[in-house]
């Protein structure tokens, strides 16, 4: 855990006044964002799925702007909501000001929510992608500080994972555990993980849901499991780490902030780090597997196709070519096109964040270790953050404004193993992989 906090404010009165102002704006931001439910506002109902499957995924879904206006009403006045955030931005600019590091984060989050509302106002039109790209990025974007694109990652990983035969990996994980049992087993695990703190125990609800697109999803204090789906033992381990330790854990840590309660809520800009951190947890706990990796990677490739103009039918055909069932082809393609334009060119790009975010988190961690700053790493779990927030939160922790995260995975509570992994990782980049692969390739090519 980080070193103990020490204030840099001139006196306790100034510190408390600063915290009180931040707390006021924090609560206002939490209240303002409450009715904004992006996934609910863009999801397709059962009638679209039934029609798509009836036609063999050979026709475009009727997800038009009219569909969203009539069947997916927002439940709030979008222009009034944008103005509400504008007024909050004005107040933040005056005190503590945009030059203040936490004030800048609050201002940015308000701006992000405004863009999210504008995106929802444009559902079913090319304008949706314009705002969505600002919020979630594009597969054709470069990684921070590098020339490599997210699409490059998808192409390379697709090549590597496509060459791995699951039968050669030594273990098979049969999907034979019904959703009802998964609910009970996760409930028991979360009780141990989140209820172990005697001062701040937390309770996670685990429940069945028959209206979900994904097999599992996390909310503020709950995890939903899709009714009727069978899971493997490995997937239960994965869900515990991904949905519980990361998604619910960061929410609980944000809620336990005495000042920065906004950290419990996630504007779209935090999506890549949230999903990337969750996938990184799968990686370092060895709960991820090539089938899962292919699924996440295919989202990059499918999204890139849609950005390039491929329509819903063509993306379904891509998934069909990867061996997915018809139902999974529909579900995977609908994740790409929900809210966007089904004829292509304007997808919903959130799903590139799983792999993109994992690389971002990995690079951040190894940089922190390389620079001898491991103490900032636990603040990835302080709440819903972007990577640029983490050093700020640590500095404000030392000033007595931010609270340290309560719920930390074991690998982030004891950083010794992670530090060594990242230390060696800094050297791996210096190795000429082409030459190494050529050398070892000659040894194993006949196997």
Image (spheres, grey):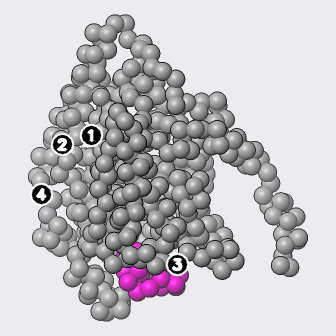
Q: Nearer the viewer, mark 2 or mark 3?
A: 3
Relative placement, left or right, of 126 versus 378 is left
Residue 423 falls inside the magenta stretch: no
Residue 32 image label: 2
Q: Quadrant of residue 6?
A: top left
Q: Are marks 4 and 1 in contact (CB under 8 Å)?
A: no
| Residue 362 is at least partly visible in this image | yes
Q: Quadrant of residue 345?
A: bottom left
Q: Earlier in the sequence, mark 2 or mark 4?
A: 2
Residue 75 image label: 4
**Pointer 1 local density, CA inside 10 Å: few below 14, some 14–19, many at least 20:** many
Q: Nearer the viewer, mark 4 or mark 1?
A: 4
Residue linked to disc 3: 174
At 59% across and 53% down in the image, what residue appears?
284
Residue 308 on image: x %, y %: 45, 70
Residue linked to disc 1: 110
Q: CA distance from mark 4 to mark 3?
A: 42 Å
Q: Secondary structure at mark 3?
A: loop
Q: Secondary structure at mark 2?
A: helix
* Image: magenta residue range: 319-332
Question: What count of labels does the image hold?
Answer: 4
| Residue 99 is at least partly visible in this image | no
Q: Earlier in the sequence, mark 3 or mark 1?
A: 1
**Pointer 4 local density, CA inside 10 Å: few below 14, some 14–19, many at least 20:** few
Q: CA distance from mark 3 to mark 1?
A: 45 Å
């Amino acid at each position: 855990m980080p070193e103990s906090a020490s204030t840099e404010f001139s006196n306790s009165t100034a510190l408390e006044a600063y915290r009180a102002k931040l707390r006021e704006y924090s609560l206002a931001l939490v209240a303002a964002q409450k009715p904004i439910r992006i996934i609910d506002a863009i999801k397709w109902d059962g009638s679209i799925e039934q029609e798509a499957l009836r036609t063999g995924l050979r026709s475009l879904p009727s997800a038009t702007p009219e569909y969203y206006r009539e069947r997916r009403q927002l439940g709030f006045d979008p222009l009034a909501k944008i103005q509400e955030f504008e007024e909050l931005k004005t107040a933040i600019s005056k005190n503590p000001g945009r030059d203040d590091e936490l004030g800048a984060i609050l201002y940015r989050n308000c701006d992000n929510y405004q863009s999210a509302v504008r995106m929802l106002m444009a559902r079913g039109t090319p304008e949706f992608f314009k705002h969505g790209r600002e919020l979630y990025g594009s597969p054709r974007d470069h990684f921070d500080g590098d020339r490599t694109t997210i699409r490059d990652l998808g192409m390379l990983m697709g090549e590597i994972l496509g060459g791995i035969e699951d039968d050669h990996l030594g273990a098979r994980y049969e999907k034979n555990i019904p959703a009802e049992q998964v609910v009970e087993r996760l409930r028991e695990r979360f009780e141990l993980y989140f209820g172990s703190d005697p001062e701040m125990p937390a309770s996670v609800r685990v429940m069945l849901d028959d209206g979900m697109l994904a097999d599992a999803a996390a909310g503020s204090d709950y995890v939903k499991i899709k009714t009727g789906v069978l899971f493997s033992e490995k997937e239960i381990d994965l869900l515990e780490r991904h949905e519980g330790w990361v998604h619910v854990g960061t929410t609980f840590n944000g809620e336990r902030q005495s000042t920065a309660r906004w950290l419990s809520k996630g504007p779209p800009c935090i999506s890549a780090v949230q999903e990337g951190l969750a996938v990184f947890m799968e990686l370092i706990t060895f709960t991820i597997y090539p089938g899962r990796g292919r699924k996440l990677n295919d989202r990059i490739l499918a999204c890139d196709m849609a950005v390039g103009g491929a329509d819903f039918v063509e993306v379904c055909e891509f998934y069909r070519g990867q061996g997915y069932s018809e139902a999974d082809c529909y579900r995977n393609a609908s994740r790409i096109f929900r809210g966007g334009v089904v004829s292509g060119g304007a997808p919903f790009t959130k799903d590139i964040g799983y792999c993109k975010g994992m690389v971002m988190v990995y690079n951040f961690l190894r940089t922190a270790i390389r620079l001898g700053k491991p103490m900032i790493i636990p603040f990835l779990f302080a709440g819903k953050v972007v990577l640029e927030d983490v050093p700020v939160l640590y500095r404000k922790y030392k000033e007595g404004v931010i609270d340290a995260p309560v719920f930390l995975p074991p690998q982030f509570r004891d950083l010794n193993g992670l530090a060594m992994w990242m230390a060696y990782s800094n050297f791996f980049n210096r190795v000429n992989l082409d030459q190494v692969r050529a050398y070892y390739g000659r040894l194993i090519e006949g196997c």
